[in-house]
Image (cartoon, rainbow, N blue to C red):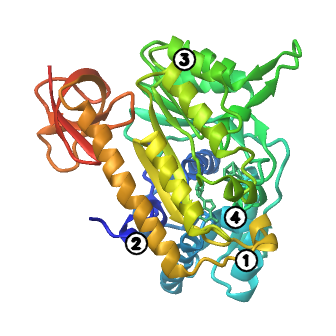
């Protein structure tokens, strides 16, 4: 069985270098962008690329060729921050060989570590926070002339609504659309409200415009992104009407029946039956919900400031099962939050049994500076207890994921082909509506097409089948 440390979220350990598909001929300078953390950060990097492309930069996947290196960083757990620091040290080695090279830190670490990186350690030339990317050209110019270059101002309005992102490193089939920014929830363990600021929703029309544009460009699947999509709320100043997430979801699904729609992340305290009803009404809205539980115990949930109880969460699960009987459900789970007892940990395992998650992201609690939890509670669960509890959660999830995949064996699913399988150029890989990865022989179909696949066998992570 996979060890806990291997398991803990690969995305934190590997940044992804992004390659630009089309670049203007003759562009002078080359930028290298590396993204860490959540999908929102990857989506933001596409906005950064769009802003700098206008300034004449080209992207490169070869860091040795770069004139400008930017790391779009994540602060959510300590481990993510350590990885970025190591990368910065490595890039400073390159700068010694090429002194004109500029190195910048973007994203969630910018706010917190700007002084440390710029002044104390002097390992970066500029720092720009998630709401200040429009200022990048100015900041980079300042850095180039040797001045202190930083903008980490958070905004109450910025949604980058009209910036058309440059699609980076994707498969040309699925794309993200950011529908809101920031978060007002103040979960006690979480830095996001501090690093990304207050919640704001993007203009519905600009979202629809982007969806239509992506469809025209040949994309077949879009994922609507926000820290808490259920609290999407946009006021149309023309008629004063307030648009909810359910209404947005319906409007996006109507763009085209051939465009698959996904969304992430839902919040249990806000997820409405109205959203579930819209999902049930439209075949092109994927039957998959990421509904992070974090813990199965009321007192821990209260201390986490999550705004719901275990019973409330179960009621939301029951609603999903009632309205969308086949819907897949995934979760985020934290092991060893402040003060968590063995019984409370057991409640989390019991919750996992109740739901039978198809998939889960599982973490050890990692104390983050200035969060409510850091100020209010002791991070008192010993490291080895956290590890053991996380392993128990991971073990249970392996079984649950396998059971969920085994139920798919023998059934036929519509699969959107994302491209060649990573292991064989004779096979396709794609996903079902339930977000399950399927591998099958290339007997027909092409990248971006829908095929009917009969599932023959599975592991806990993947389905294997054949086109029927
Ligand atoms: N420690 C561990 N996990 C965390 N997450 C957020 N903050 C922390 C933290 N301090 C997890 C939550 C959240 C996911 C994105 O990351 O489970 O849903
Ligand atoms: Fe963090 Fe909670 Fe907001 Fe998610 S909902 S980003 S966990 S504060």
- How far across and down, in percent of the image, does residue 87 sit? 50, 76
Front-lying residue, 122 or 82: 82
Q: Quadrant of the N terminus?
A: bottom left
- How far across and down, in percent of the image, does residue 436 sit? 34, 37
Numbered disc in front, either 3 or 4: 3
Is 59 placed above or below 70 here? above
- How far across and down, in percent of the image, does residue 21 sit? 41, 43
Judged left or right of residue 141, residue 173 is left
Does dot 4 land on a helix, a strand or a loop? Answer: helix
Of marks 3 and 4, which one's residue comes earlier in the chain? 4
Residue holding disc 2: 5
Q: Is mark 1 within 8 Å of ligand 1?
A: no
Does dot 1 land on a helix, a strand or a loop? Answer: loop
Q: CA distance from mark 4 to mark 1?
A: 41 Å
Of marks 3 and 1, which one's residue comes earlier in the chain? 3
Q: CA distance from mark 2 to mark 1?
A: 24 Å
Q: CA distance from mark 3 to mark 4?
A: 39 Å
Can residue 134 be seen here? The reply is: yes
Numbered disc in front, either 3 or 1: 1
Tell me the crowding category of disc 4: few under 14, some 14 to 19, or many 20 or more residues within 10 angstroms, Cα based: many
Residue holding disc 3: 253
Which residue is drawn at the image coordinates 53% and 27% (left, top)? 320
Can residue 214 be seen here? The reply is: no
Residue holding disc 1: 378
Which residue is drawn at the image coordinates 74% and 23% (left, top)? 244
Residue holding disc 4: 140
Is 272 placed above or below 47 here? above
Which residue is drawn at the image coordinates 48% and 36% (left, top)? 175
Q: Is mark 4 within 8 Å of ligand 2?
A: no
């Amino acid at each position: 069985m996979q060890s806990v440390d291997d398991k803990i979220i690969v995305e934190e350990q590997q940044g992804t270098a992004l390659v630009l598909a089309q670049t203007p001929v003759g562009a002078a300078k080359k930028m290298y962008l590396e993204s860490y953390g959540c999908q929102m950060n990857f989506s933001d990097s596409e906005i950064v690329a769009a802003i700098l492309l206008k300034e004449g930069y080209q992207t490169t996947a070869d860091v040795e060729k770069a004139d400008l290196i930017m790391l779009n960083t994540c602060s959510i757990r300590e481990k993510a921050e350590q990885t970025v620091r190591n990368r910065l040290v490595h890039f400073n080695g390159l700068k010694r060989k090429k002194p004109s090279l500029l190195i910048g830190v973007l994203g969630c670490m910018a706010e917190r570590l700007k002084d440390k990186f710029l002044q104390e350690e002097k390992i970066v030339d500029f720092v720009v926070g998630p709401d200040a990317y429009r200022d990048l050209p100015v900041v980079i110019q300042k850095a180039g002339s040797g001045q202190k270059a930083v903008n980490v101002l958070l905004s109450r309005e910025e949604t980058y609504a009209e910036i058309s992102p440059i699609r980076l490193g994707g498969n040309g089939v699925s794309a993200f659309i950011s529908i809101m920014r920031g978060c007002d929830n103040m979960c006690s363990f979480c830095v996001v409200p501090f690093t990304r600021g207050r919640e704001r929703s993007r203009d519905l029309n600009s979202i629809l415009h982007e969806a239509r544009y992506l469809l025209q460009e040949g994309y077949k699947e879009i994922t609507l992104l926000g820290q808490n999509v259920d609290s999407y709320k946009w006021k149309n100043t023309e008629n004063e009407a307030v648009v909810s997430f359910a209404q947005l979801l319906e409007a996006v699904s109507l763009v085209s029946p051939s465009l698959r729609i996904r969304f992430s992340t839902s919040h249990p305290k806000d997820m409405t039956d109205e959203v579930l009803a819209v999902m049930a009404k439209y075949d092109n809205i994927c039957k998959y919900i990421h509904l992070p539980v974090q813990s199965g115990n009321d007192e821990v949930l209260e201390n986490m400031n999550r705004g719901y109880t275990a019973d409330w969460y179960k009621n939301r699960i029951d609603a999903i099962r009632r309205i969308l009987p086949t819907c897949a459900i995934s979760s985020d789970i934290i092991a060893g939050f402040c003060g968590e007892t063995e019984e409370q940990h057991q409640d989390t395992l019991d919750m996992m049994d109740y739901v039978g998650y198809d998939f889960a992201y599982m973490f050890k609690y990692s104390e983050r500076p200035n969060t409510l939890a850091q100020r209010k509670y002791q991070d008192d669960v010993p490291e080895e207890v956290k590890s053991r509890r996380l392993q128990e959660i991971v073990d249970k999830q392996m079984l649950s994921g396998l059971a969920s995949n085994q139920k798919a064996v023998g059934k036929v699913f519509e699969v959107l082909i994302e491209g060649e399988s990573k292991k064989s150029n004779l096979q396709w890989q794609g996903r079902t509506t339930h977000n399950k990865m399927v591998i099958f022989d290339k007997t027909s179909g092409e990248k971006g097409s829908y095929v009917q696949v009969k599932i023959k066998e599975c592991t806990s992570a993947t389905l294997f089948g054949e086109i029927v």
